[in-house]
Image (cartoon, coloured by chain):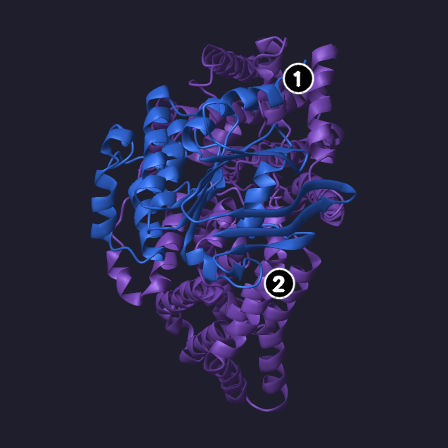
Amino acid sequence: MLEINNLKKQYGSAIVLNIPELNIPKGQSFGLVGNNGAGKTTFFNLILDLIRPTSGYVMNNGVKVNESEEWKYKTSAYLDESFLIGYLLPDEYFYMLGDLRNWSKEKVDSFLVDFDELFNGEILETKKYIRDLSKGNQKKVGVVGALIGDPELILLDEPFANLDPTTQIRLKKLLVKIVNDEKKTVLVSSHNLNHVTDVADRIVVLEKGDIIKDLHTNEQTLKELEEVFNVE
Amino acid sequence: MNYSSKYLIGLELKEFFRSRRFAKRIVLKILVVFAYLYFGLVAILMGVVGYYAIKEELPEENTFLFGNRYLLYFFFIFFILYLFLSPSPSMKVRPLMILPIKKKRILNYFLLKLNLNYLSLFAFTIISSYTVVLFLNEKSRMGVLLWFFSVIAVILSLVFIALLMEKSYKVIAIVVVIFAAIFGLKHYGILDIPDLSGRIFYSIYENPWLSLVAFGFLTLVFVYTYKWMMSRFYLDGALKVKSEKVLDIKLSWLDRFGTTSIFLKNDIRMILRNKRPRKAALFSLYFLLYGFWVFGFDTNNTSPNIFKLLFGSMLITGGFLFSFGNYVPAWDSEYIRLFMSQNIKYSQYLDSKWWLMVVSVIFLSILSIPFIYYGVDKYLLILAMAVFNIGFNSYLVLIGGLFNDSPIRLSEKVKAFQNTQGFNINSFLLGMLRLLLPILVYYLAHKYYTDNIGLLLLVSIGLIGVLLKSKIMSYIEGLYRKKKYSLLESFAKEE
């Protein structure tokens, strides 16, 4: 699905990301962990062609993201609030994304039925603009919005932050389900090692722009990760 | 001046000097300073000339008494302007709340700063220079001095009342009732405002102890404002940012326009639901009124000024085009990263913006039908300018918008003299081009040939532009593609 080739991002003399090679096959759930400044968000921005790489490239589904826009049909993302449109009602936001991804209103409606539990009656038909929702509810809108329109690749930056414990557990189940049942590729970044190990089959640890660990998740993974980050 | 006040002022200065694009804007800041100086001079002249003009024109009247007759109108105009322009600088109180600075200090500072706005300073300057002249001409210096302080007290009180109006419906109701009562009494001839005004303020001069009433009023308003703010000095009190009521209108009828409609719907919602774009849209109506003013003057005047006519007739239909189009990608800056990672084609995006502007020009041309009253030739000029706006200026505006790379915070109010977001020399030059070119084209035809050739030229340029739309739009699309990364970067930055 994703091929990273000699990808490098540099600001002045500071290298913020340097990935010589990385392949993420289709249907993998990929976890990205690292301390602040490790380059997680930079990596996501590069995959989405929101910033220009200093050198190298990202191939998404066979096309270079900075040369063709074909990848946009199959890719969706929720990185932060700038992916929301504050003055829309959540319903309108979902319909708009549906419009852009060729889903009819009816299809969006039937898709949203599954999220009633997650939304907890605080999102749909509440007559509240997205900008007036709480941070947690905004995140729910963004994450669910990123699932609309059958994308094959989904990027989520810190999806568990700001969510209440119940929703965190629900979201984890949801992500596991779409990877296992629907064969989607999901990239998740998080500061919470527990969550990542629960969700991802593969976990990559970034430190100051470099990949320092590439693990396939098993019983030992959490421990191993804790050791990486345990600085005495 | 104690430590914490110094600290507060220091924060303000840092906010100013460390703001992004500070260097870029320095030219504009200098211009603003000149504007302040100019208006300061105007204010002084108004004060000085005002007095001598009355004396000259009406030598038999008591000059000071006569001036006082219009003081209530002065206050009224000041108050209305203050409410509309809301010139007082905003202050970021939130981060100060849990710092070890006494609430009292923050609040005092806030209330002081409220009065240091350009409108109040303008009013103070007029009154001060007027007072200096009074000092030289009137007998009782004590009277003049206390009169001066009373007038200042009224201006200060009005600013506090305006603040309360922003926060409380009760105060709005009281103010509206008082104004309605005054206008009602005036309408039925019970109240003679100039007479009342003259009497009140001249009696302060004659009996200086009456100024205590004005001081008392100010004290009352100040204490009330202070207490009111103090008791609500919480995030859910006076500092709360009010969330707007949801404005839900059916836009599904737009769906027939295909992908363009996705953005059209979005743009209409954006304009209706956010303060800044709403203001930009309202601006276009001001331009329409400006047109009435230009043409209205023209019928009374014997010699019509051709430039003023041309300028007016272009702005009548182009108001929205200019006030909205000039910030085209910037309006979407808050969520530009979403748009850029969706399967959105630039051409669709730009197309919807173009259509929105075209529709606005057509709509404003219809609204301007009453201008036929000033002559069919005038209306034809307006229509020719409308075609020019559609076929030429619309593209220029879209290109100019690209240079405005400052993000727009949609829900923030714009303030006059602070609307420096996105000022850029390139977009300024493009702006001049789209204003001056049609005027020049028409003027040359008017001077060397006939007016009809001028009209024909404007319409032809417009029509050619419409015919070449797909070519021009794909050129603009290319420009957008090139600017993508730098726009994304600068839109992500806070001001």
Q: Position of residue B411 (x, y in %)?
A: 47, 39
Specify whether residue B203 is in view.
Answer: no
Front-most of residues B172 and B400: B400
Q: Give the residue at x 68% y 55%.
A: B424
Disc 1 sits on a residue from what chain?
A
Question: Which residue of the protein is positioned furthest toward the right in this rendering?
Answer: A13
Residue at image point 46% right, 18% down: B235
Which amino acid lies under the numbered mark 2 shown in the image of this protein?
Lys
Label 1 sits on a secondary structure element that is loop
Check disc 2 and report the residue beneath it.
B482
- Are circles 1 and 2 on residues that touch, CB within 8 Å? no
B360 up-or-down from B456: above or below: above
Rendered location of residue B266, percent (x, y): 38, 53
Please tell me which residue lies in front, B187 or B232.
B232
Closer to the camera in the image, B357 or A141: A141
Drawing shade for chain A: blue
Mark 1: which amino acid? Val
Q: Chain of mark 2?
A: B
Identify the hue of chain B. purple
Q: From the viewer's perspective, is residue B374 above or below residue B169?
A: below
- In terms of depth relative to the viewer, which is nearer, B300 or B272? B272
Q: Residue B26: give x, y in percent of width and height.
A: 76, 45
The picture places residue B246, in percent across and down from the top left corner, at 31, 38
Write down the quadrant of residue B46 in the picture.
Answer: top right
Judging by the rendered image, the residue that carries numbered circle 1 is: A231
- B298 horizontally vs B189: left or right: right
